[in-house]
Image (cartoon, rainbow, N blue to C red):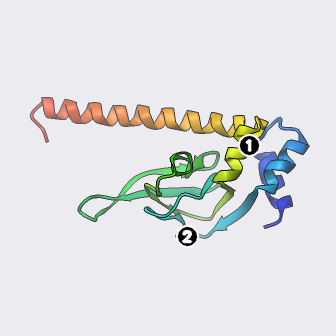
Amino acid sequence: MAAGTAFDAIARHPAFVGLAAADVEQVAAGCENLHLPAGGVLFAEGEESLYLYVVLHGRLRVTCRAASGVEVVVGESQGGEVVGEMGVIDGAPRAATLTAIGPVEVLQMRGEFLTGLVNGGHPAAAALLRVVRRQLVARIRETDERVDAVFESCARGGR
């Protein structure tokens, strides 16, 4: 879609509030504004990780396949979050499938573009990395709580 659409989306997103118009324009040039209908797949587990996405509106269901092949819902992502960042950072295939729960709007950014922003010290890179850092810390804390609950259950004789 047009950079103007991406420009408007970036300019109104809380992570980018305060960026100069010229900085927003530079980021918009490297983004595409995408709309998914309910049930649309943003990306699938195992796919190559070429893009990260800033969720503007809507919610995405995060699922993974267990070793048995059963699909397991492991969480949700919503407006304001960045998704797909792990594969872009480490180059690994997608670790999960993200499916729109209802209509979803995202900004799509190529991983190489993000790398250029980071290497160039662009203010938008710092804004995105703050969001990613906050999300990763929250995921680690949630995982710690789940692991603690499993250990507690095992200590009481549960399985």
Please report whichever mark, 2 or 1, sits nearer to the chain's N-terminal start: 2
Residue 45 vs 119, above or below: the answer is below
Across the whole image, how many numbered discs are drawn on residues? 2
Amino acid type, mark 1: Leu
Q: CA distance from mark 2 to mark 1?
A: 29 Å
Which of these two is toward me, 28 or 61?
28
| Label 1 sits on residue | 117
Helix, strand or loop for disc 2: loop
Dot 1, how many residues are within 10 Å of its Cα: few (below 14), some (14-19), or many (20+)?
some
Q: Position of residue 136 (x, y in %)?
A: 51, 37
Residue 19 vs 52, above or below: the answer is above
Q: Name the image quarter holding the N terminus.
A: bottom right
Mark 2 vs mark 1: in front: 1
Q: Which residue is at 74% across, 43% downward?
A: 117
Dot 2, how many residues are within 10 Å of its Cα: few (below 14), some (14-19), or many (20+)?
some
Q: Position of residue 14 (x, y in %)?
A: 73, 40
The quadrant holding residue 109 is bottom right
Which of these two is toward me, 116 or 76?
116
Specify the label residue 40 is tagged with.
2
Q: Which residue is at 63% across, 49% downward?
A: 79
Specify the label residue 140 is tagged with.
none
Amino acid type, mark 2: Gly
84 relative to 11 in the view: left or right: left
Residue 4 vs 90, above or below: the answer is below
60 relative to 80 in the view: left or right: left
Q: Name the image quarter holding the C terminus.
A: top left
Q: Is residue 46 visible?
A: yes
Helix, strand or loop for disc 1: helix
111 relative to 84 in the view: left or right: right
Q: Position of residue 142 (x, y in %)?
A: 40, 35
Q: Which residue is at 83% across, 53% downward?
A: 7
